[in-house]
Structures are given as C-alpha cells and as structure tokens.
Amino acid sequence: MPEPHPSSTHGRPKRPEVTLRKLELSDLDAIERIEKASYPAPWSRSMFVSELAKPSSLSLGAVGAKSELAGYLIVSRYVDAWHVMNVAVAPGYRRHGIASALLERLFDVTRDDARRGYTLEVRVSNVAAIRLYERFGFSSHGVRPGYYTDNREDALIMWRDADQRDAGEKDAGDKDAERPDAEKPDAEKPDAEKPDAGQRDDESQPEEPTE
C-alpha cells in the first residue's frame, strides 16, 4: 500500500512529501518525459513495458502531492543480486532526496532477502553518483571497459552486501542520483554486458545523478 515518505529536516532542503508505490503502465507517459529529461540515451517505452511486466523486477515510483510522478527506480532480481537498472528524478524534484527515498524503500522491501546483495554500474566520471551510492554502502568492485555506447566510457561496478542493510541510509541525505548506469534490463546476470539502451543513467543505465 502506498505510504507517504516523511520530509527531511536537519538543515537540509525540505524533502517534498511524496508517496512511494509500484509503477503502473498508466505511468508510462510520465516515465518517458522524465527519462528523456534525464538521459542522453534514454530507454525506449518498450523497455519500460518489459521491466514493469517482469515478475523478477521491482519498479517503484515516487508520486508528488498533485499525483504527478516525481521519480522512479527499476531493479531486476538475479540469482545472487538485485541489479539497480534505472533511477531517475523529474527536473522539478531534483536535489530534494527523491532518489534517496527510492533507494531506502528498495532496501526496506528487500530486507528479508538474505541471499542477495545489490549491484549497479555507474560512469567512472560520475563522481556525485558514486559518492551517493557509497553513502548507501556500495563499494567499487571493478571496471567494465568501454561499457557506455555513446562515448565508450568505462563503468565502475559497485556492490553492496546483503547483510549491509543499514549502512549509509541514515547519511545518504537528499542527494538524487540519476540512475545507476546499467546498460540494459535484459542482461542474464548482474555481471553480464548488456545491449545499450539509455539511462536514467543512460542507454539503459542509472547514470548521472541530478542531486
């Protein structure tokens, strides 16, 4: 059931009150607008339709006070990991902790899954996104050379262990990372190279954090 996410205080910009819920096909128009405003190589509509239909995917949306979609997070479940595929926040909601709220909900709803850790790819030049993920307990586990098809930039592979449930969430603050740069939703496993599609972080990736 959708639940309002409380606003943040402690001297930081107040986090807009949003409701976190499962994404639906009726959200596709808003998803496409946010995606195109967030990434140079956006996912296609069909890619989102595919992810929303997969039993192994977890698709979360943040909805504002006027029922408008403020952001979304798409994660695929693999044998040993939850792979963060796409994270995006609408321009008007950036720098207000929406991405952090979505990540917090991800860790909350998967808390009892002791077998799986979390993984994502991010451009090596995307320092802001890397720092955000580090605050959530992710650490570097290698590089994928030439991973991004738009400019052949390398991707940093990041990983968070399954038992690291509370690491970083408290201090993640109000940063909004675009989407972890995951090249594509159709990879067979977290480590597989994926055909490119475009993110919230790129051709099918979580990418540049718009914090």
Image (cartoon, helix red, strand yellow):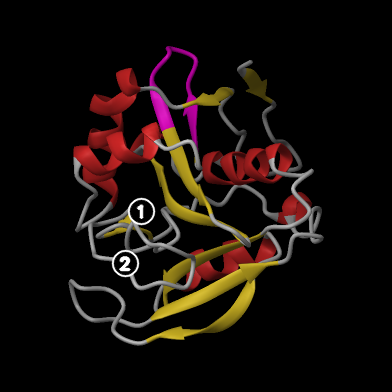
Residue 94 can be seen in this image = yes
Q: Quadrant of residue 164?
A: bottom right
Dot 2 surroundings within 10 Å: few (below 14), some, or many (20 or more)? many
Residue shown at the point (63%, 62%) measured from the top left? 80
Residue shown at the point (23%, 34%) measured from the top left? 33
Of residues 98 and 92, the one nearer the viewer is: 98
Q: Quadrant of residue 89?
A: top left
Discs 2, 1 touching: Cβ within 8 Å: yes
Q: Quadrant of the N terminus?
A: top right
Residue shown at the point (20%, 57%) measured from the top left? 41
Side of 25 relative to 118 (left or right)? left
Of residues 200 and 183, the one nearer the viewer is: 183
Q: Position of residue 158 (x, y in %)?
A: 56, 72
Q: What secondary structure is the stretch in magenta mostly built from?
A: strand
Q: Is residue 148 above or below residue 174?
A: below
| Amino acid type at mark 1 | Pro
Q: Position of residue 30 (x, y in %)?
A: 28, 27
Residue hosting label 1: 185
Residue hosting label 2: 194
Q: Is residue 79 above or below residue 102?
A: below
| Amino acid type at mark 2 | Lys
Q: Is residue 199 above or below residue 11?
A: below
Determine whether the residue tagged by mark 2 lies in a helix, strand or loop: loop
